[in-house]
Image (cartoon, grey):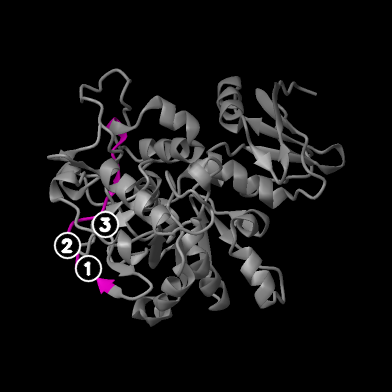
Amino acid sequence: MEARAGDVSKQSIRERIWDYMESHNIADFPRPVHHRIPNFKGSYLAGQSIRDLEVFAGTQEVKVDPDKPLEGVRLLALQSRKTLLVPTPRLRTGLFNKIIPPPGATKDILRKCATSQGVRNFSVPVGLDSNVLVDLVVVGSVAVSEKGWRIGKGEGYADLEYAMMVSMGAVHEGTLVVTIVHDCQVVDIPEALLEDHDLTVDYILTPTRVIATGCARPKPTGILWSKVSCEMLTKIPVLRSLREREKRAGTDVTLQAEPGNTQQPAPSTVRRPQDRPQSQPAPSTVRRPQDRPQSQAGFRGRSHSSLEGTDTHLAATVCLGNLPYSARVRELKRALQELGAVPLRLTWQGPQHRAILHYTDSAAAQQAASLLQGLRLGDNALRVSLGQQRDT
């Protein structure tokens, strides 16, 4: 349950803003804006003022949420030839995608790339071991205060995305967070409503103002696994991959319902500096080659086209069928890395629209098959089945 300050709650603030934007015709497509990050008339103009921020001029990689009012910022990032990263909706297929416009893209094509449809059509997934270092994060908001305190639509994805980026070393202490809102969305937010998982912002851009918040409240420093439910882990494959990664690094990744977790369940899934055990160092914000988990190197030195000259005593395989005609090996590899299901060897059978994944034993294959359920490449939902690889 969300915190309250007298008769005020985060939800009451959301409802007040949504109602006001609709009744005063400030809202823009898609409408109604209730239960959304609201789009508003003037959002494109507000987004253009990000060019006046020194950090935007100097940044190379920008992460911008997929919300409609941020479409102008995504376009500006592409026009400025910056690397644009956009989170996948509800984190179903990974953490974020890299938008890659086609060669020689015109302004009209770039405008399409900046839309939600363009994000789907002109992007490639970014794996957890990609050397990504985001200098600027742009998020949508329902409400924000001049102190930098933010309220989203209530699902917690922006907060979780940031915590996951910390865990994979994609953000650092100097990464700034910007939000773009209408002036009516800048309101007083009682401090009593703030929770540990809430992401704060450093700049607020509106159609009429640029507000430097000077917020000193610490941002999340990672995922607090004792607050993560098994249901969340099931719905968000990349969260499972991060958990396996941190488990190998020696982090306590006990979930809410698992034996040994005596903490009371709470909605926060992100870690603050004060939550980190004193004996553990802060997560590194720089990705080094030696930090890469060994299990993620499963493709290295392996042929994807033949089994010749390899050990045929693999205990189990997973077959992926219904691959799109246009699918490429590298696309599948990225998806496998994203889901934490990297095999020892991959056999590509393009003409048959399938691939065979080879694992060390049946348990590993079964785990991989479970992780791969629901995987899509392009418009195709892949068929996942187990199969034994016997001696020949």
Q: Which range is magenta?
A: 211-226
Q: Which residue is mark 3?
A: 200
Q: Which residue is mark 2?
A: 216
Question: Is 385 situated above or below 305?
Answer: above
- Residue at image position (69%, 43%) is 377
Q: Secondary structure at mark 2?
A: loop
- Residue at image position (56%, 31%) is 371
Nearer to us in this view, 324 or 113: 113
- Is residue 131 at all visible to an observer of this figure? no
**Mark 3 residue type:** Thr
Nearer to us in this view, 308 or 333: 333
Badges 1 and 3: C-beta atoms under 8 Å apart? yes
Q: Position of residue 252 (x, y in %)?
A: 29, 33
**Mark 2 residue type:** Ala
Question: Is 80 situated above or below 5?
Answer: below
Circle 1 residues within 10 Å: few <14, some 14–19, many ≥20: some
* 205 left or right of 106 in image: left
Q: Tell me, yes or no, whether the highlighted magenta stretch contains residue 212.
A: yes
* Whole-number angstrom distance, CA of label 1 to CA of label 2: 9 Å
* 373 left or right of 206 in image: right
Q: Which residue is mark 1?
A: 213
* Whole-number angstrom distance, CA of label 1 to CA of label 3: 9 Å
